[in-house]
Amino acid sequence: MVSPVSTAKATLDRLGKTEELPGFLLTVGTLFLAIGCAVVGLEIAAMAMLFVSVIGELVFEQRSSKASELLDQGALGMPMRFALRVIAGLVVAADQIDGIAAWRFFTLMCVVYALALCARALHQEYRRVGPLKPMETRNIPGDPQIHDAPRRRSVHVAATQLLVLAPALLGCPWVVVLLLGIGAVAILASVTIPDMRVSWALRQQKRATGFTAPLRQVQDFIDDYRPEVIVHLSGPETAAYQINTWLESLESLDRRVFIVIRDHALFTKMGSTTIPSLELSDAGELLMLDFSGARIALYPSNTGNNIHLLRLPTLMSAFIGHGDSDKSASNNPFSRAYDELWVAGAAGADRYRRSGLGIHEDQYRFVGRPQVHAISREPGLGDAPVPTVLYAPTWEGVNLEQEYSSVSAVGQKIVESLLAADPPVRIVFKAHPFTGQRDAKYRADLARIADLIDEAASRTGVDHRVIKGGSINEWFNRASAMITDISSVVSDFLASEKPYAVFNHTDLDDAAFREDYPSTSAGTIIGRDGRGIAEFIAVVTQQVADEQASRRAELATYLLGPQEQRSLQAFREAIDAFIERSDTDRASYRDGTSTPEQEMPSAESEQ
């Protein structure tokens, strides 16, 4: 059974960490305060709270929000909130209503108005679960889009509720109660009916041809733009780094690129770009679009939705990933579905070879790592009076088999040791954005680590920092050394050839761990008991010699490819070569010629 404490904590986690909390308290909080005041007989306070809660709808219902969705799911949506206001108002102001006629017309208007609110709620639910799915675009002429919900109309809703409630509760004559009530219903209908007609028109368009008008605009743009490179990604909003890490490289191409994002929250978190981009969650609508002019499709992540483009024989596919790492996800069996697997250096291909997945050698394309082209070797050890150590742990993974993170196991010990270092070091803490997504204890550990760092910054004056957003590459260039876990962060940081340490999440000894995870072979290993932390701090503060420098340079080449391949130009050349291959290998599909089918041998011929 879920405890009340857990329920309250989950609710606060959903509301209290966003900008939605003030509107929630202003609307729902004051509504229940009004009910409480009415029960104990505080009429004036109840009336004041009642009207404040109506005004609060202006803040709370400005847009579709998680808090609003939570209330809808809990049967406390707009119609119910209005009904509670009516009840609370009647408790404190029943004797102020001007006669039986005012009572009757007030009741009638409340019922009619509530029905209008129910119609709006029904329309909103239709848009949420019905066949019309959200669509948004960037850098496409006309900005074609379909919103994930009808417009909130918060000003109209708040104003019309006041028109219905205020006249009766303030003792106005029945004529005023009736006329203002009719006006409120008319105003609400004047904005609700057009919104419903828009939804109806979109539905009819989709029913007739499969294309809504906005989707047709997208197809017209595709026909005119004729993209050569499609980039496809789906996932939660916290997966935005998976596309953001490629934006600079994609924008550097002299090819026509088109980005397809399959989830609304992820699309909103994608970084600023000049590349035409489409957010389209509905698989059927994506299948309607004609991408026959495109040559290649790039996939930064292995997700089930990838199949919707992989099915197109005219497109050659490449898994480009979102980082080079020794995680098991770097040799996922799904990778066999792609025409090519783009790896930075020899390490990427070796992972697949060791996995025994049967990947053909001609599937590998060695493209280097363009994202690290701007990573600097400065500051080196001794360049700053107080060296900066970047602690960048990964998240807990999708399951226990992929739990590489040091956050819960030894995170606090790492931070406490760094804070106690003599000579001192500066800490920059940047956790993976997924941390705590599967296991809530990681969120609590993150909070404790952040508190330790913030308190130390206040106490010592050292500029320790907790970083929650932005690119990690800029912090590579500000750090003298790094502590991390098995992840792509190791490989990217190695471009700087600076000292690093990696958490051993296994029960293996350090030698066996290095063998299983080659990216750690030039770093210090940190165990669950904290071993290795003091050794690493001694290197960073130059109390002992840095003996791994030459090995780090060799390992960087193994993981990331030679220096000349870690560039935007090398990435452009890889794209050009892949498009050229596509033009050759998929020509028969594009020109409509059939591929000869081999005859199946008969039973007699096999004998």
Image (spheres, grey):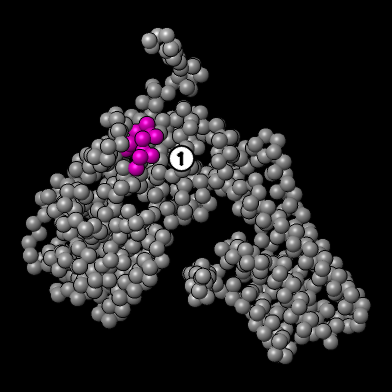
State the SS at label 1: helix
Numbered label tally: 1
> Which residue in the rendered view is the most extreme toward the bottom?
41
**126 or 159: nearer the viewer:** 126
Q: Is residue 10 above or below residue 217?
A: below
Q: Quadrant of residue 163?
A: bottom right
Image coordinates for residue 597, horizontal then vertical, percent: 45, 15
- Residue at 67% x, 56% y: name it: 125
**208 or 518: nearer the viewer:** 518
Image coordinates for residue 349, horizontal then vertical, percent: 25, 38
- Residue at 76% x, 80% y: name it: 89
Image coordinates for residue 574, horizontal then vertical, percent: 32, 34
Q: Is residue 259 above or below residue 479?
A: above
* Residue 336 magenta-highlighted: yes
Write the start and end of the magenta stretch as one range: 332-342
For residue 211, side relative to residue 231 (left or right): right
**153 or 101: nearer the viewer:** 101
* Residue 272 magenta-highlighted: no
Task: State the quadrant of the C terminus.
Answer: top left
Name the residue that disc number 1 marks.
306
